[in-house]
Image (tube, rainbow, N blue to C red):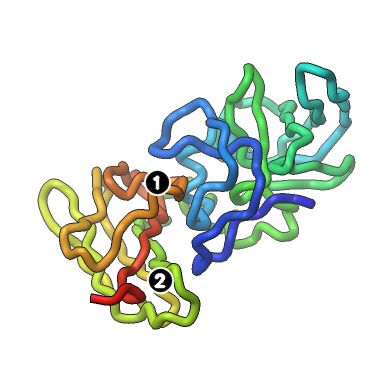
Amino acid sequence: MLLRLPSPSSRISFLPAFLILAVALSHPLVTSAYCPVPEIRANGEFFKSDAVFTGTVLSIRETPDTDKDIGGWFYRMNVEEMFRGPASKIITVYTENSSARFPLEKGRTYLLFAFKQNGRLEIFGCGNSALLSEASDALTRLRNLRVGKQPSEIEGWFVADTAGIDLSGVIVTVKNQSRSYTAVTDKDGWFHFPAPPGRYRLDLSSKEYYLNADDLSWYKPEGFVLHAGECASLQAVSVRHLSK
């Protein structure tokens, strides 16, 4: 079964993934027990990827499991639309035969987000890689980003340890060097606001929410960079379920 990201309102990730993205735009990938949270938009994953493109699978080469290494599949792709990465019409990507694998089928066309790992471009089940027919929103964001029409945004979700807690109306503050941005969560604990490019951090001083130490995030709430056209996705835990 393919590993997919949890829903925005879920705090627990699917288990057990083999590799996930390192947070804060860094490489290489790191070993972990689960996918990073929360769900990331295509115009966020773009800035963390080494290659983003649409392409059709031309051929597949399988590498078997051994005593020392997990096997996987190499896919030779005919590139149709390149958003980020080498200017090449043919690209080979790899997915390992682990719970984070993203297997492809010969002759089918995909939108892929690939990352340099182990001297090759690897694809994973965490993120926005998908069949092209299922990637309309991601493609719209990427094409808008390419022509400078995608706004820069910060969004996020508040979650609770106890199910059924009302997460609406939580005031969240995100700061950069010059000002603070305040948003209010909706009934699902979701918040969203436009923001100019820059370096930001989630303000934790209100004590109304905290970071779960066990969560691995696509963005470090304690400090992250927002690029032009990027959507940064954050997650924190509301304290509303705790007695005061």
Residue in the image at 66% along x and 57% along y: 135
Q: Amino acid at mark 1?
A: Tyr
Q: Residues within 10 Å of mark 1 (few under 14, many from 20)?
A: many
Q: Residue furthest front?
A: 243
**Which residue position holds label 1?**
219
- 129 vs 241, left or right, is right
Looking at the rendered structure, the secondary structure element under dot 1 is loop
Q: Residue furthest left?
A: 178
Q: Position of residue 84 (x, y in %)?
A: 54, 35
Q: Residues within 10 Å of mark 2 (few under 14, many from 20)?
A: many
Pick the front one: 168 or 48: 168
The answer to which quarter of the image holds residue 65 is top right
The answer to which quarter of the image holds residue 202 is bottom left
- Earlier in the chain: of badge 2 and badge 1, it is 2
- With respect to residue 111, does 181 lie above or below? below
The answer to which quarter of the image holds residue 33 is top right
Q: Position of residue 134 (x, y in %)?
A: 71, 60
Quarter holding the C terminus? bottom left
Tag shown at residue 190: 2
Tag shown at residue 205: none
Pick the front one: 91 or 224: 224
- 137 vs 65, left or right, is left
- With respect to residue 206, does 15 lie above or below? above
Q: Amino acid at mark 2?
A: Trp
User: Disc 2 and disc 1: Cα gap in Å?
Assistant: 16 Å
Q: Position of residue 22 (x, y in %)?
A: 48, 35
Residue in the image at 30% along x and 62% along y: 194
Residue in the image at 67% along x and 25% along y: 88
Looking at the rendered structure, the secondary structure element under dot 2 is strand
